[in-house]
Amino acid sequence: MTALLRLSEVTKTVRVPDAEPLTILHGVDLVVELGERVSVVGRSGSGKSTLLNILGLLDSPSSGVFEFEGVPVERIAGRARDLRRGADIGFVFQQFNLLSGRTALENVTMPLLYASGRRFWRRRAIASEMLERVGLGHRLDSVPEVLSGGEQQRVAIARSLVRGPRLILADEPTGALDVETGSSVIDLLEEVARDNGAALVVITHDPAVASRSEVGYRLDAGRLSPVSAEVAA
Ligand SMILES: Nc1ncnc2c1ncn2[C@@H]1O[C@H](COP(=O)(O)OP(=O)(O)O)[C@@H](O)[C@H]1O
Ligand SMILES: [Mg+2]
């Protein structure tokens, strides 16, 4: 079976004004299958967000091969890449990035404005079902300003997952939450990923979050290596 994501020898080098080019990722090899739950730990500055942006088709590798469902991503043209990102990938960030002054329902409806046919016409019903699923059926009309951090992250998750992505990418999703709220947010991500048969990649500096994944990696100064089960336990 074709892997959902396959990276071979992927590097990322950026040009910095008046300095040598900076290599952020070195020879990254990674395979992610549909339905798999993967974590990547690493300290600040190790390249985690750079890797996540590449996995999410927001950024491109400088060298190496990255295949999304068997297709090298450099062969997916800009417009097709945007469509694929919208349909197949859900992002969850540390900052919730909700539109202020808009209700939870309006925020979650937003991604469905790009849907077509029945999903477009049913968008409010689909969005409220999704908010129901994240435990916020009673807060449909609340704006982010009156919601707690944990509730805002649930709205953000509902918005990211309302189109049923096959790949869920979370960058420090618990970074702005207390331990208990963070743990329930991870429960929720795992539950939605399982129900949808999606792959879940969680990037975190929190070992407790990382230890919950099936497959663990560590990123150290741009080099990715598997974390063995004994070390993770
Ligand atoms: N576009 C860029 N230009 C220059 N430096 C960058 C750029 N993107 C990231 N970096 C640097 O690369 C390193 C890794 O960044 P990042 O992927 O954000 O790490 P992490 O998410 O693990 O904290 C950092 O030192 C950061 O400053
Ligand atoms: Mg980061």
Image (tube, rainbow, N blue to C red):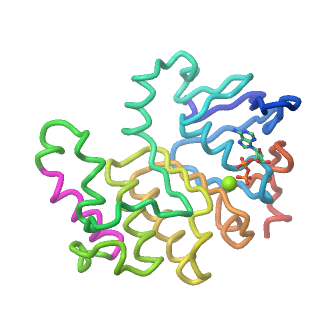
- The percent position of residue 11, horizontal first and vertical second, equals 77, 30
Question: As displayed, is residue 148 above or below residue 26?
Answer: below
Q: Residue furthest front?
A: 18
- The percent position of residue 6, horizontal first and vertical second, equals 64, 32
Give the residue displayed 25% in from the left and 47% down from the top: 112
- The percent position of residue 28, horizontal first and vertical second, equals 77, 35
- Quarter of the image with the C terminus in it: bottom right
- Quarter of the image with the N terminus in it: top right
Q: Nearer the viewer, residue 132 or 24?
A: 24
Q: Nearer the viewer, residue 44 or 206?
A: 44
Give the residue displayed 80% in from the left and 44% down from the top: 224
Q: Is residue 11 visible?
A: no
Magenta residues span 122-135
Give the residue displayed 34% in from the left and 65% down from the top: 100
Q: Quadrant of residue 55?
A: top right
Give the residue displayed 44% in from the left and 36% down from the top: 85
**Per the image, is 112 magenta?**
no
**Mostly what secondary structure, the magenta segment?**
helix
Q: Is residue 106 left or right of residue 44?
A: left
Q: Is residue 182 left or right of residue 119?
A: right
Q: Is residue 169 left or right of residue 108?
A: right
Q: Nearer the viewer, residue 171 or 106?
A: 106
**Per the image, is 134 magenta?**
yes
What count of labels does the image hold? 0
Q: Quadrant of residue 57?
A: top right
Question: As displayed, is residue 77 above or below residue 127?
Answer: above
- The percent position of residue 82, horizontal first and vertical second, equals 42, 31
Q: Is residue 138 visible?
A: yes
